[in-house]
Amino acid sequence: MEYRKKLIAIVGPTATGKTELAVKLAKILGGEIISADSRLVYRDFNIGTAKPDKEEMQGIPHYMIDVVDPCEVYTAGKYKKEAGRLLENISKPVIITGGTGFYIRSLLEGLDIPEIDPDVEFRKAMEKLDKQDLYKKLQECDPVMALKLHYNDTFRIIRALEVQHLIGKPMSEIQSMSEPKYEVLYVGLNAADREFIYNRINQRVIKMVELGLVSECESLIEKYGRTPSLLGTLGYREICEYLDGLCSLDEAIEKIQKNTRNFAKRQLTWFRANKEIHWFNIDEATQEEIISSILQ
C-alpha cells in the first residue's frame, strides 16, 4: 500500500478559534501550520480577515498567508498546487486550518480543479454587471455551480463564468475527484448553542472596527483600487458601502455581523458533508480538552 502522509485538519465556521487551537497543537507537536483560508492569501487584508499577527502565531511557521496582492486572481487550483508543494517539503507535523471548504476539499479530499489562467478583459466586463445579473448568468450556464455559490460571492461567480468562457464547459463538469493523497485527522469546531458562535461573531466585528477596519479599507482602496477580492470579502464590502454614503457606520456593522452569521451557516453546511470530521463544541469543551482528545 502506498504511504500517505499523516495530517491534522482543523475546520469549521468562522470565529470558533481554529487558529488559536492550531497554534497550541503545533507547539505541542513541534509542527507547522498551513492556512486554508481564501482571504488570508491576500497581502494587506489584515483586520478585515482576522489575519493572525506575529504575537498570535507564537513563533509557529504559518504558510499560505500573504501570498499575492489583492489585485491578483488566486484560484483554488493554484492553492492546491502551492499548498501541495509545501506538504511535500515540510518534514515536521503539519496542521491545516481554515474555513474555506473548497480549499480543504481540493487539497485534502482529492477534488481536482484544472488550473486555468484568468482572462483580464472578460473579468473587467463581468465586473460591470450587478450581483443579480451575474448570478442569473451563472444559473443559466451552470446551475449546478450556482447552487453551491451565494449570490453575494461575486469573486467565485465571475471565476466560474470565466472558466466556462475560456474552455467552453461549465466549471461543475470539469471538476473531478481522485484518491486523497494524505491520511487526515479532521477536527471540526462548532457549538451546541448556535447563539454562542453568533455572539462571538458580533463581538469580533465590533473589535475589527475598533482596531481600524474603516481606515484599513480606505488604505486598500487607495493602494489597489476596488478589486473583486476586496468587494468579495465580508467586512470590506460593507465598509465600502459606508464609504459611499449608502449606509451609516452602525448599519454597516450590523450588515457585517448578519452576513458573517449567514456565512458561518454556509460553512457548517459545507463541512457537515464530510463524515470524517470529528466535531467538538467550543461551548462545552476547553481547547485543552479538545487537544487532549486529538492526541489520544
Image (spheres, rainbow, N blue to C red):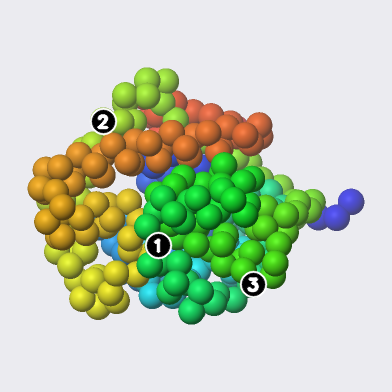
Q: Position of residue 268 (x, y in %)?
A: 49, 34
Which residue corresponds to the image point at 53% horizontal and 29% vertical from the top-left?
279
Q: Position of residue 171 (x, y in %)?
A: 65, 58
Which mark, residue 166? 3
Q: Amino acid at mark 2?
A: Asn
Which residue, given by chain and number where applicable, does mark 1 sit on? Answer: 129
Q: Secondary structure at mark 3?
A: helix
Which residue corresponds to the image point at 29% horizontal and 62% vertical from the top-left?
46
Q: Real-space Cα distance between discs 2 and 3?
A: 43 Å
As rendered, which of 53 and 68 lies closer to the eye?
68
As rendered, which of 47 and 286 lies closer to the eye?
47
Position of 20 relative to 212 (above/below): above
Of badges 1 and 3, nearer the viewer stands 1
- CB atoms of marks 2 and 1 within 8 Å: no
Which quadrant, please, contains the C terminus?
Answer: top right
Q: Amino acid at mark 1?
A: Leu
Instruction: Give the side of residue 158 with respect to residue 167, left or right.
Output: left
Which residue, given by chain and number where applicable, does mark 2 sit on? Answer: 199
